[in-house]
Amino acid sequence: MPRESGRKVVATNRKARHDYHIMDTYEAGMALMGTEVKSLREGRASLVDGFAIFYNDELYLESVYIPEYLNGSWTNHAARRRRKLLLHRAELEKIARQTRESGYTIVPLQLYFNDGLAKVEIGVGRGKKDYDKRQTLREKQDNREALRVMREKNRGA
């Protein structure tokens, strides 16, 4: 059987970029059980409530929902268990330094397979205030409106 190639996105946390100013992003591997991988290959996961936290100088992913594998037996996994993230020591120290500051948190942005290996993209971010969210939406609307006007002008010419 040929090995998978490319990137297959399983789940995206669209709300994270709306709720946080993402400063840095990192790609991390995950220590998963076999039934978790099979469930992910079916495209079933949710990152909405997820976050990452340090325990004993290691980074763990919390509250990410990977449902039980339907064809699994008694070896099935818990849907919201704590999953260890696999990063280089230098990256872990850099993330720990960034999150020591008040207001910074680690959120999962995307869950995907990269050449057959399960990866998660995590971001270190600071929570947005309500007025920041409104300003971001207003900027998106203004950009969309400007592009629409330019497109109409180019059609008429």
Image: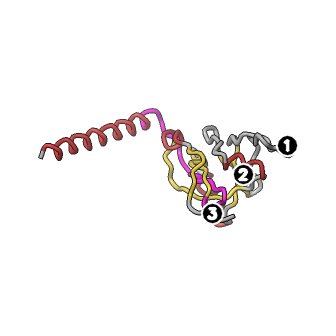
Residue under numbered circle 3: 91
Q: Position of residue 12 (x, y in %)?
A: 56, 45
Please indicate whether residue 2 sits to the left or right of residue 76 in the image.
left
Please say if 44 is above or below 89: above
Numbered disc in front, either 3 or 2: 2
Q: Point out residue 2 in the picture as x, y percentages from the top left corner.
A: 66, 65
**Total numbered circles:** 3
Could you tell me which residue is drawn at 63 percent across and 63 percent down?
A: 91
Q: What is the magenta range? A: 114-132
Q: Amino acid at mark 1?
A: Ser
Q: Which residue is mark 2?
A: 37
> What residue do we see at 69% from left, 40% from top?
65
Q: Secondary structure at mark 3?
A: helix
Query: What is the spatial separation of the Cα atoms under label 3 and label 2, in whole angstroms?
Result: 25 Å
Q: In the shown orientation, is residue 100 left or right of residue 80?
A: left
Classify mark 2: residues with Cα within 10 Å, few (<14), some (14-19) or many (20+). Answer: some
Asked if marks 3 and 1 touch (Cβ < 8 Å), the reply is: no
